[in-house]
Image (cartoon, rainbow, N blue to C red):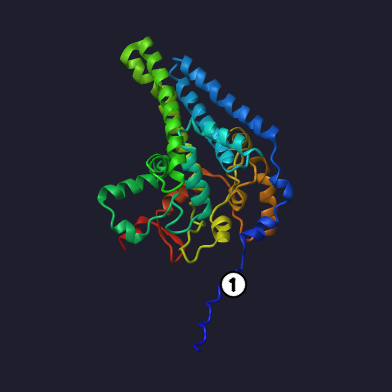
Amino acid sequence: MESAAPKTMPRPRKQSLNDVRAVIPDTCYEKSSTKGWLALAQGAVLYVVPLVLLALTTQWWAIPLLWLAVGLAIAGLFVLGHDASHGALFNSSRANRIVALTCMAPSAHVEAAWNLGHNRIHHGYTTRQGFDFVWHPTTVEEYAEFSMLKRLRHRFEWSFLGSGAYYLRVVWWEKMWRFAAAGKNRKAIRRDKFGLGVVLLLAIAVPVVVGALQSGVVGAIWLPIKLIVVPFLIFVQVIGWTVYVHHVSPDIRWWTRRGWSQFSGQMESTTILHMPRLINRLWFYNIVVHIPHHVDARIPFHQLPRAAAAIEDKYSDTVKVDRFSLVDYARATRSCKLYDFDAGRWLPYAAATS
């Protein structure tokens, strides 16, 4: 009788994400309907008021300021919808679903597709090579195979001004609107695409008609651009930048498939950023306190700072804490162009020609 072949022993687990979750106080998981609804009311006011003012004003100097205000408000609503999509805003799954659909509508995000791409793939495989599609780095070998046009696109999207263009193409278009899921997700995504598509058509039709009645063809073109297109593009730039600073920096590592672990992806490959309190309170809702959000997406936004403090106290040698700086962002966009997954380091474009 032949002896059974020896089983391959699994590699010993040195660090576990469950160990990190264990240091987070139970109170950090407590949702507050009051805080949730107040945040939604704030987000709605910050969106509706400047949007109405934008519709009414003809002062050239006021329009760019109102564009910025509406774009930031769309970002704020999106963050709240993002939390609801994670089930982190309210105890009711139905309430979370309705809020996610509503708050993501101004940013034209398909909630079911976002749930699959962001909640399951990005959070499930953060910074893992070949899995996480959000700001996935390009290797030297891959860049060498690019056409001239593709290289120019890469250089712009990974530049100081290109984060919005990257987000619009890769995340919003390719991984959401263009994406056709297989299996059980297909029906839900198609349903949400259809529903949101109807809402967007109506939202565009109203300013087109009003603009046409006011100023003819010029008004029919200008008013939807003024009220919808430009604020949306500002939102895209804001959210693209936000996602970039979460996962791209000279000291943020991406991992090979075999070298990746949940601990490394969620603890070592994102950050806790401090930004001006008023800006965070009005529009960002602690989303830049990103490590605890990746450790456990069930933590509501108002509990993230407390969860971050508990994690930082226990894992101070691992957690990256910094204050947001345009200088640091510019430094990252200069040095983080290509990536060597084996060495675990970012490279400049010059590495492709050396």
Q: Return the residue found at the far bottom.
A: 1
Residue 312 visible in the displayed image: no
> How many other residues sit within 10 Å of disc 1, few (<14), some (14-19) or many (≥20)?
few
Q: Name which quarter of the figure residue 84 lies in.
A: top right
Q: Does 78 appear above or below 58?
A: below
Q: Residue at x 30, y 50 (%)?
A: 151
Callout count: 1
The local secondary structure at tag 1 comes to: loop
Badge 1 is on which residue? 12
Q: Closer to the camera, 98 or 325? A: 98
In the picture, the quarter occupied by the C terminus is bottom left
Q: Closer to the camera, 160 or 28? A: 28
Q: Residue at x 43, y 66 (%)?
A: 342
x and y, in percent, of residue 329 in the image: 49, 46
x and y, in percent, of residue 172 in the image: 42, 40
Residue 106 visible in the displayed image: yes
Q: Residue at x 46, y 53 (%)?
A: 132
Q: Does 100 appear above or below 264?
A: above
Q: Closer to the camera, 351 or 267? A: 267
x and y, in percent, of residue 215 in the image: 35, 11
Residue type for callout 1: Pro
Q: Return the residue found at the far front.
A: 1
Q: Name which quarter of the figure residue 48 lies in.
A: top right
Q: Is residue 115 left or right of residue 353?
A: right
x and y, in percent, of residue 193 in the image: 43, 35
Q: Return the residue found at the far left.
A: 148
